Image (tube, rainbow, N blue to C red):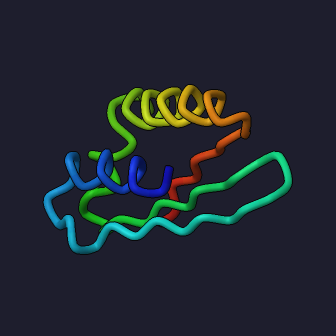
Amino acid sequence: MKTLVESMAKALVDKSEDVKVTEIEGEKTTVFELRVAQTDLGKVIGKQGKTARAMRTILGAAGTKIGKRCVLEILE
């Protein structure tokens, strides 16, 4: 799951070396914290948050398949 978030983010940004994903594991919920370069933040969020929403939808669908709730947080 971590590699899924990382590969989606790296495909969107210019500075792929600055993409960092931290996984915080809980009992039923896993939180993924995504950090990108300040200049690439807009590309990850997208217009009106559509790109971020799409990434969260994909992550949620993949999490459902393994029986966990997955949450994506985009940090500055």
The outermost residue toward the left is: 14
Q: Would residue 12 be found to the left or right of residue 64 on screen?
A: left
Q: Nearer the viewer, residue 34 or 69?
A: 69
Q: Would residue 33 be found to the left or right of residue 20 on screen?
A: right
Image location (x, y in percent) of residue 14: 14, 59
The outermost residue toward the right is: 27
Q: Nearer the viewer, residue 71 or 3?
A: 3
Q: Nearer the viewer, residue 67 or 10?
A: 67
Give me the residue at 25% from left, 63% from top.
Answer: 39
Q: Would residue 65 be found to the left or right of residue 34 on screen?
A: right
Q: Nearer the viewer, residue 38 or 29?
A: 29
Image location (x, y in percent) of residue 10: 24, 55
Q: Would residue 69 be found to the left or right of residue 49 on screen?
A: right
Give me the residue at 39% from left, 56% from top.
Answer: 3
Give me the residue at 44% from left, 37% from top.
Answer: 52
Answer with the quarter of the image where residue 35 lies.
bottom left
Above or below 1: residue 64: above
Above or below 51: residue 12: below
Image location (x, y in percent) of residue 61: 56, 26
Give me the residue at 72% from left, 34% from top.
Answer: 67
The outermost residue toward the front is: 66
Image location (x, y in percent) of residue 47: 34, 30
